[in-house]
Image (tube, rainbow, N blue to C red):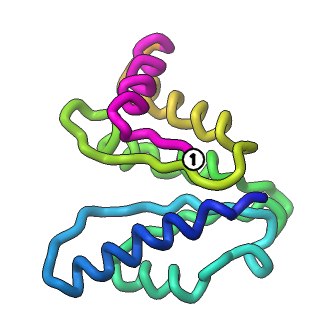
Amino acid sequence: GLGTGLAPFRAFVEQRKSQTTDGHKVGQMTLFFGGRYSRAEYYYRDEFEAYEKEGLVKCCNAWSRDTAKKIYVQHKIMEEADSIWNNLGVPGSKGYFFLCGSKQPEKDVYAALLGIFRDKGKMNDAQAYSLMEKLQADGRYVTE
């Protein structure tokens, strides 16, 4: 179900913690994580909140049933449009996007990224799709 992909991402953050402990610099990292109810589905909550306080990761959580207005991961992605464009879309950018967990939101996440590329990159549909294809071919947009 949803959320099953958080464990691999947790390993990325643990590796970053180890690297910083050893004196290495690491770049920014953002986690988009969602589920229905934060109280029941925010796996590793204490760890991720501690990692966020340490500056290892920025957590952008979406809980679709915690409030009257349903908030999904793609909404949180759109809130971070500038950062996503700067890390994935700008020529010469070196960011990566890993989508883990249920296949259910994949099409909505993909559509959100295309929208960011069209808006921030002033791209037409063909150019946005071409960029997504290049990111996939280069291993910079990966789905499990």
Where is residue 141 shown, x and y percent of the image?
44, 39
| Residue 71 occupies quadrant | bottom right
Residue name at image x 49 percent, y 62 percent:
31
Q: Is residue 104 above or below residue 90?
A: below
Count of labels in the image: 1
Residue name at image x 63 percent, y 48 percent:
75
| Left or right: where 50 falls relative to 3 | left
Residue 127 on the magenta segment: yes
Where is residue 101 shown, x and y percent of the image?
65, 55
Magenta stretch, main secondary structure class: helix
Where is residue 34 shown, x and y percent of the image?
67, 61
Question: Mark 1, residues whose alpha carbon is within 10 Å: few (<14), some, or many (≥20)?
Answer: few
Query: Dot 1 corresponds to which residue?
Result: 144
| Residue 37 occupies quadrant | bottom right
Foreground residue, 105 or 115? 105
| Left or right: where 56 falls relative to 71 | left
Secondary structure state at the residue bearing disc 1: loop
What type is the residue that disc 1 sits on?
A: Glu
* Bounds of the magenta segment: 125-144
In which quadrant of the rendered image does the N terminus lie? Answer: bottom right
Residue name at image x 15 percent, y 75 percent:
24
Q: Is residue 133 above or below residue 65?
A: above
Q: Is residue 84 above or below residue 91?
A: below
Where is residue 38 shown, x and y percent of the image?
74, 75
Residue name at image x 60 percent, y 31 percent:
111
| Left or right: where 61 falls relative to 131 | right
Residue 116 on the magenta segment: no
